[in-house]
Amino acid sequence: MTAVIAILVVLVGILVSIALHEVGHMVPAKKFGVRVSHYFVGFGPTLWSRTKGETEYGVKAIPLGGYVRLVGMYPPAPAGKKQSDGFFGRMVQDAREMSAEEILPGQEPRAFYNLSVPKKVIVMFGGPFMNLVIAFVLMTIVLVGIGLPQATTTVGLVPQCVTPATAPADYECTADDPLTPAAEAGLEPGDTIVSFDGEPVTSWDSLVGKITGAAGETVPVVVERDGERTTLEITPAEVERPVVGDDGQYVRDDAGELVLRPTGYVGVAPTQERVSEPLSAVPEAIWQQVSGTAAIIVSLPARLVDIGQAAFGDEARDPSSPVGPVGVTIVAADLLDAGEGDLVGQVATMLSLLASLNIALFAFNLIPLPPLDGGHIAGALYEGAKRQVAKVRGLPRPAHADVARLVPLGLAMWVVLLGMGLLLIYADIVNPVRLT
């Protein structure tokens, strides 16, 4: 049942995100007078369509993308330019002819290529920007509306024994394991820790810091239990625990073993409560995801090699590995399972996942290569740069940038994207990234 819910959430979320992405292109295009002949979500056979005004709206069978057809994407060939008779030359010429055929008689000024450079950039940036807006809205709901779980100073769990540093999560205490200092002192779930060694406890982090430096010392701990305060005597044990790095991951040595260090240990786990973040936390969270996604895109070629080795060999799949639609569904199911019983937490998790998907769509579409939006933006900026250089040098205004010449590169990119998608799907099936 969890898997079904995860599939539905991911599928609907992707479809809505794609649909709004295309709206981000269509609205400014129509505003600037460009004729938009088609607006479709999905690829392949048409399941449903309806024509309203001059635009046909519809849904296609394969929910892996979408498109709006902006009439006149490619300008005519530059005057006097000799056309190549080779395969790629014919491909470029066919693209120009198809673009010209879509322009109705007398509507040449409404062609996309006749827009000013700023308007072209706005139209092409509108799609990715819509994904960024979606992510901002979803993260606002999660951070400000729902809040993030934070540890409180109230005890939620008191383990009965001191476990080894590398013990699994389901480790069961034995007769040889010593009692935890908390259990030995009589600390109970539900107790709120008021002070430690005479110093007020204002947060869980402050309590951890006090415990860390008190190994072997017997200190008074004041707790509030059933409305009354009680003083307990606790002697934190000195144990070895894994070192956590700034990235929140366990630090390992060159041999791959966990790095341990001695620390004070009492043996308590806190309760959690959700605390709303200020609105100012949303842009920071968005920026962290955008910069992290950009770093993944930069390292994507090397990551694809690792994914291929994991899919067709014996290599372990990196937990931070990029995933495709199947992988996203598996991750979503794992997250739902991990939050079972906490409906609010599950909702927040799914919204965060959809926000991450929209951040990925935003960043990926800005890669300056056709057929991605970033490729069209790069073409418009190149055209603007040519005009500015000509203006400064006192030269005649140059013709439109011949972006049709990039059609073969766009086709090659489609092949690369298709291959990458198939590889991710296969890897997600045979060797998926699992969170549990």
Image (cartoon, grey):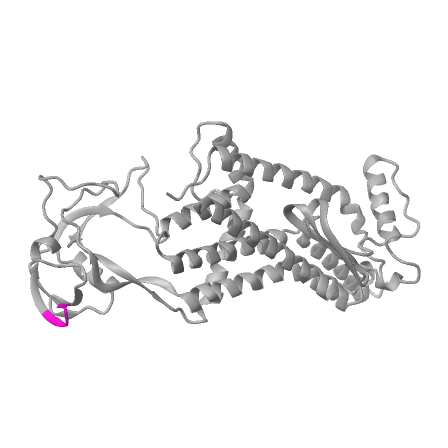
Nearest the eye: 33 or 156: 156
Q: Quadrant of the C terminus?
A: top left
Nearest the eye: 359 or 6: 6
Q: Tell how many labels.
A: 0
Residue 362: percent from the left, percent from the top? Answer: 59, 56
Magenta span: helix, strand or loop, mainly? strand
Q: Is residue 95 above or below residue 143?
A: above
In this rendering, position of residue 117 left or right of residue 283: right
Q: Is residue 91 magenta?
A: no
Residue 164: percent from the left, percent from the top? Answer: 18, 42
Nearest the eye: 6 or 210: 6
Residue 324 visible? The answer is: no
Q: Residue furthest top?
A: 313
In this rendering, position of residue 417 left or right of residue 52: left
Residue 156: percent from the left, percent from the top? Answer: 22, 58
The image quarter in which residue 29 lies: bottom right
Write down the region rendered in magenta.
Answer: 224-229
Q: Residue at x 80, y 54 (%)?
A: 73
In this rendering, position of residue 432 left or right of residue 101: left
Q: Residue at x 93, y 49 (%)?
A: 80
Residue 133 visible? The answer is: yes
The image quarter in which residue 254 lies: top left
Residue 408: percent from the left, percent from the top? Answer: 76, 41
The image quarter in which residue 90 lies: top right
Q: Quadrant of the N terminus?
A: top left
Q: Is residue 98 above or below residue 107?
A: above
In this rendering, position of residue 185 left or right of residue 110: left
Q: Residue at x 76, y 65 (%)?
A: 30
